[in-house]
Image (tube, rainbow, N blue to C red):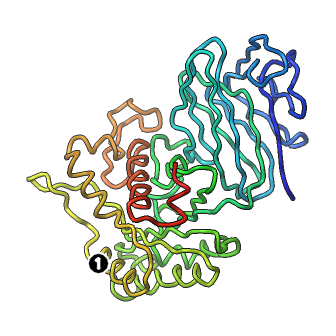
Amino acid sequence: MSIHLKFDFGPETSSAKAGFTKISGSTTYNAKSGYGFMEGAAIYERDRGKPGTLRQDFCIPLGAVFIADVPDGNYTIHALMGDAKSATCTGLKVGEGRLLLAECRTAEGEFAANSFSVHVTDGQLRLAFSGIAPRINALEIVSAPQAATLYLVGDSTVTDQPLEGYPYAGWGQMFPMFFKADAAVANYAVSGRSSKSFLNEGRFEPILEKLNANDYLFIQFGHNDQKLDEERATSPYTTYKEHLSIYIGEARKRGATPILVTPVQRRFFDNEGKLIDTHGDYITAMKELAEAEEVILIDLAAESKRLFEALGPEETKSLFLWAWPGEFPNFPQGAEDNTHFQQQGGIAVAELVAACIRKQGILPLQRYLR
């Protein structure tokens, strides 16, 4: 079933553009209509008095979430943001904090039209707004079966961390901001999983049901394969390779392109400011497998090592989940985490992956990058 929803945001007193549904600040989501703002946010609205255009009016969605019920699948979102009489600054995330726009700024009288493709898995498209002066004039949500899906499997360094954990973020959560509407990121990575436990828990099956020849499968495991418990532990040159080979083989059976990603580095430095590698043979084993199976390899371990060493022990704290007491409401006692990222770090690591795609000339994936 093809979907094409069109929403015009602004006061109820201003008429909607032909073919669009009016959304005001008081349009609260309910299951019957299947769209609207989630309850609890402060949403304001203005009409600038230019009837008949999508630019005449808007909502100011301060920390608001807009919901639209849609069948599972890929959708392209066209968003219009701006204000005829004021500068604006709007951020936009989808689902569990997956970043689409970090900061869309417009000058007075300027309007920005942005398009993205997103992957929906639970029958609801949720768009979360942020920014110091957010605006939304119009949204169109259109079925996008033609968009490539970039499936991610991995651990907590990749996964979509929940909104209540902000600024905790995986790099896969920030990955969508680097792609045009040609591709949708589907992040299936889960905290605490290894190449073995992800398979044994049945977490790969939902991907296999949808994976096709237009898609990519990014595979980053290693952090938890080092653990000693039976559920997760693998040996680099035997069971680690064997489990990674399953992901590769299943992707290829369906015509999809597997991409191995060496595990991102942790934040451990020696006395000379050089990064201490904590993954050892797992990195070497993945590289050997990539060569033997002729699989594309993104060496995120090497790229993150270069980045973290360039920044140094102190500045890398701004990438990892280091926080002073009271700095972030979700971590009132502060945090000192040398494995997991805050949003800024997730963006930086996702940018490394995107840069590798471009540098290595991975086609047609390279053409999908912004």
In-image side of 354 versus 85 (left or right): left
Which of the pair 144/13 is nearer the observer?
Answer: 144
Q: Is 77 placed left or right of 327 in the picture?
A: right
**Residue 22 in picture, x, y percent from top left:** 85, 28
State the residue at coordinates (34%, 42%).
Answer: 335
* Image quadrant assignment for residue 342: top left
Q: Nearer the viewer, residue 194 or 182?
A: 182
Q: Which residue occupies the extreme left position in the image?
A: 272
Total marks shown come to 1
Q: Is residue 233 above or below residue 364?
A: below
Q: What SS does tag 1 mark?
A: helix
Residue 354 at x, y = what percent?
A: 44, 55
State whether residue 107 is above or below residue 347. above
Q: Residue at x 56, y 79 (%)?
A: 200
Q: Is residue 320 above or below residue 47?
A: below
**Dot 1 alpha-carbon crowd within 10 angstroms: few under 14, some 14 to 19, many 20 or more:** some
Locate residue 89: give its quadrant.
top right
- The three-letter amino acid code for the residue at tag 1 is Thr
Q: Position of residue 271 (x, y in %)?
A: 9, 53
Q: Quadrant of the N terminus?
A: bottom right
In this picture, residue 71 sits left or right of residue 350: right
**Residue at the image point whose x is 8% and y is 53% from the top:** 272
The residue positioned 56% from the left and 33% from the top of the image is 91
Question: Which residue is labeled 1 in the image?
Answer: 284
- Residue 73: where, in percent of width, then height? 74, 59
On the image, which quarter does residue 104 sit in? top right
Q: Is residue 39 above or below residue 224?
A: above
